[in-house]
Every structure is written in C-alpha cells, then in structure tokens.
Image (cartoon, helix red, strand yellow):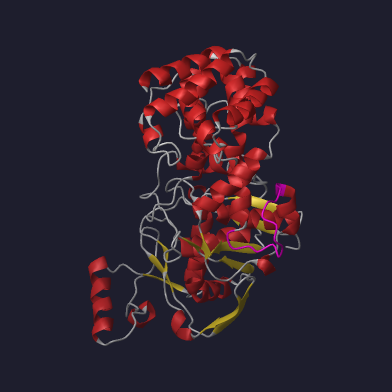
Amino acid sequence: MSSVRTRFAPSPTGFLHVGGARAALFPWLLAKQNDGAFLLRIEDTDQAREVVGAVDTIKETLNWLGITWDEGPDIGGPYGPYVQSQRIDSYHKWAERLVKDGRAYADTRSPEELQHLRDDAKSKKQPFLARNYRPENPIPWQLGMPLRFLSDPKTYKWHDEIMGNLSAGADAVDDFILLKSDGQPTYNFAHIIDDYEMKITHVVRGLEYIASMPKYLNLYDALDIPWPKFVHMPHIMGADGKKKLSKREGAKSILDYKQQGYLPEAILNFLALLGWNPGTTEEIFTKDQLIKGFSLERVQRSGARFDEKRLSWMNGVYIRGLPIDELQKRAKEFWPTEASDYDEPYKKKVLSLVAERLKYLAELPELTMFFFKDLPLDYKLISTNKKLKDFSNSDLKAMLDTVLNSLTESDFSLKDLSDRLNSLLQTINQPPAILFSLIRIATTQAPSSPPLAESLEVIGKTRTLRRIRQQLDAL
C-alpha cells in the first residue's frame, strides 16, 4: 500500500451536484499528484433508492469534467468488481467471519420493537445505544436475517489529514447493522471491506461521516484490517453560508451547468477552490496546475460557501481566454435558431464582439439576436433610458436624421464608421452617453450591445439604415 490509491464511491440515486463532484475531484487530485490510482466504485446496495440511468449520468458528468478513473465498473481493474451489488459474496464471507469470532449476532427484532426500545431510552433520559439492548438469547444467524455488529466500546484517537488529531469516548461506539434481511450490506460495513480489498490508501469523503468514525474504527479492529488514512472534507454551504448545499436545498446537477454553457475547466477550477486555499492571490488554474499545487494541508476545516456569481465570473474568464476558433466550436449548440441562416464567418464576427460580455454560452441568443433578425421596436428602451427620457420626440428625430444622413454616405468599413460617429458627436453636440445610446437603441432594439462601430459594421449598411428609418417612423 505504498502508492496512493483513492476512490470516488457514489450511490446511483440521482444526478451529481457540486458537492458530489468535489467529492470526486479532491481524491482524483491527490492520486494524480502522487502518480497513484483513482478508482470509481458504484455503491448500489440501497436498491430502493436507486434511480434508473443514474450510473450513466455520474460517468457522463465525471468524463465531461475530465475526472477520469484508472479502475472502475466499465474498464475493470485488478480488484473488481467495482459495483457493490456484484460483490455480495465477499460481504457474506466477511460477515461469517465476524459471526464465527463472536463479533456479530442475528437481530430479528421488528422496527416497532426497536422503536419501543428507543422510547424506553428516551424516557430514562439516556441516549439510545443498541449495545445496551442486545437480545438476551439471540438465535444463530443465517442468510436472510439482519446481522448486527457486536461492538467493543473503547476510547479512540485517530488522525484526520484535514481535521487533525481527533478522539471519541466509548459512548460513541455502538452496535450497528452489517447485513440487512435481504442480504445486502449497509454502507457502514461494505465500504470498509471494499476499501481494504481494493487497497485504498486514503479514504476521502464528506465531513458528515466523521461522527461515525469510532464505529468504523471498532469494525476495522474486529476485522483485523489496518486503518487507511482518513480525509474528511469540509461541507459546501449554500449561498447564505447557513445550510449545507444539497439537492434538497436546490443544488443543481453539474450537467445543468453544461447545458447552460459553462466550461468544464472553469467548473473544475471553481470546485477545487471550494475549501482549498492555494496560498496565493491567484484564482485561475489549469488542470495541470491544480494537480501540481493541490495539498491536503491547505484544505480549510470550515465550510466553503457556494457562490454561483463567482462561478459565472470565473467561467467568463475562461471564455475570454479561449482562441476564437475554439470558442466557436464550444458555442456551436448555443446560437439562436435564427443564426442557422448565416454562415460561420459571420457568426465568428458576432462571437468575437460579444465574447467579452459572455458569462456562459447560453447567453448567446439574448446577446446576439439583433445580429440575426430585426427586433420589434421597444418604446420603453428610450423612455426608461436615464440619458434620453427627457428629450422630446422632435429632438430625438433631429439627432437620428443627422445620423441617417451621415451613415448613408458611409462605406461601413470600421474606420469610416468610427470616424463618422466621432464626427457626429461634434456636429450634434451631444456626448457619447446620449448620442451613442440613441443610435444603439435604434439599430439593435436591445438594452446593451458590444462597441457601436464594430456592431454596425457587422449588422451591415442595409439593415442599419432600415432600422434607423423604422425608429424615426416610430418617433
């Protein structure tokens, strides 16, 4: 176990959200940094909660993010199978060993009986510990019966690679179910067997599991299995910093971000900084830089707040960093339907104009529609504009008439348009905030646009003059 071996072991109960993706990223970074192996294991023993297609969704998400696995259910490996439902014989073998050693017993009490015992403990103002209510005359266990671990309560001290040195008293150790009546193992049992048989060196998972560590350690000892290194990551909190981010609290699927036009490298960068402090003021890292720079020592112990605005900002940085040809490939599925009538060189010009303003690619239709079709006149754009609302219609018409006359003589090259717009500022004697806002509204019918001269060049002379005339008629 000298080389680093880590794993991501999701349950196929739905999509992968931000918390799940980071739970895969940190052990992946740790393995890659140490030239180790990263495993994908599917924990599907809770079949009542399994969602059809969830395994494929998990794989698609990880592949899109670039979190690839060295061993797993689809590619195999020396310690497979990598799906828990295919490993039942192994769990039964270890269970029989515990029974033989006197460290597990059949517990056939009904849920109602167990609830009665919980109520009894509550009435005595005591915590419910299953070990205090062991059956007096347990029957011999056989498959088809629930099997409960017979704990050996003791004080434990252990080291967590993030949380530091931890300890717990004997009261934290209790009996717990190993196998359910249908023969399926519980997580508390199966993950310990799997990690040992797959030679996992670092168990990386969420902070919610740390409360169960004394029970896990007791089972490790009973099985005579050496402890791996434990790495419990801090929670990802919601935007308000008060609640843990979860599907129940509205966390979106990572694939939803894909459909919105977020870039996988931006998502990966963002996830890495949820709890990890690189120790510099830098925030943008390539995948190779993340692998090289990541360290458990700089993972914070407190919760990391999820800020979607920061993610959008970071995604915008990545969009602007792409060569225009690469950005055009990524944007292929995000254009408005009206863009299908235009060739790729034209769309490339449009994309180069709006790239600076894109936070995610799904914004393309809103930001570019006026390049592909004449939008209906929106009278509110002028009446609600702080710079234009106090002008009379006749004043606005006078300005636009002058603009129309000048642009009619233009060859619509970028240089000529720039020169004419600057000249119009002198002729009409209005600042850019007023004149250019009026021209922009008249020619785009949009609340904002890329630089005016560049936009007019792409829109073209015929459409520009037609739109100005329509605005004049409306005034």
The kind of secondary structure the magenta stretch mainly shows is: loop
Q: Position of residue 99 (x, y in %)?
A: 47, 70
Q: Which of 77 and 157 is in front in this view?
A: 157
In the image, is 77 to the left or to the right of 250? right
Whether residue 294 appears in magenta in the rendering, the answer is: no
Asked if residue 72 shows in the view, the reply is: no
**x then y, percent, for residue 330:** 61, 31
Check the image and report above or below for 195 versus 152. Answer: above
Where does the N terminus fall, quadrant-wise?
Answer: bottom right
Residue 22 in sight in this render = yes
Q: Nearer the viewer, residue 66 or 376?
A: 376
Residue at figure coordinates x 53%, y 26% from the top left? 333
Left or right, 82 with reference to 215: right
Q: Does the magenta stretch include residue 285?
A: yes
Identify the image quadrant of the C terminus: top left
Residue 263 position in % (x across, y down): 59, 40
Above or below, 390 against 84 in this view is: above
> Which residue is found at the position 64% from the left and 42% from the top?
318
Question: Is residue 138 placed above or below 371 in the rendered structure?
Answer: below
Q: Give the range drawn in magenta.
A: 274-287
Question: Residue 432 versus residue 128: which sits nearer the camera?
Answer: 432
Residue nearer the viewer, 354 or 155: 354
Residue shown at 66% from the left, 46% from the top: 77
Q: Residue 274 placed where, x, y %?
A: 58, 59
Total number of numbered labels? 0
Tell me which corner region of the image, top left, top right, bottom left or bottom right, holds residue 66: top right
Task: Relative to 428, say whether 469 is above or below.
Answer: above
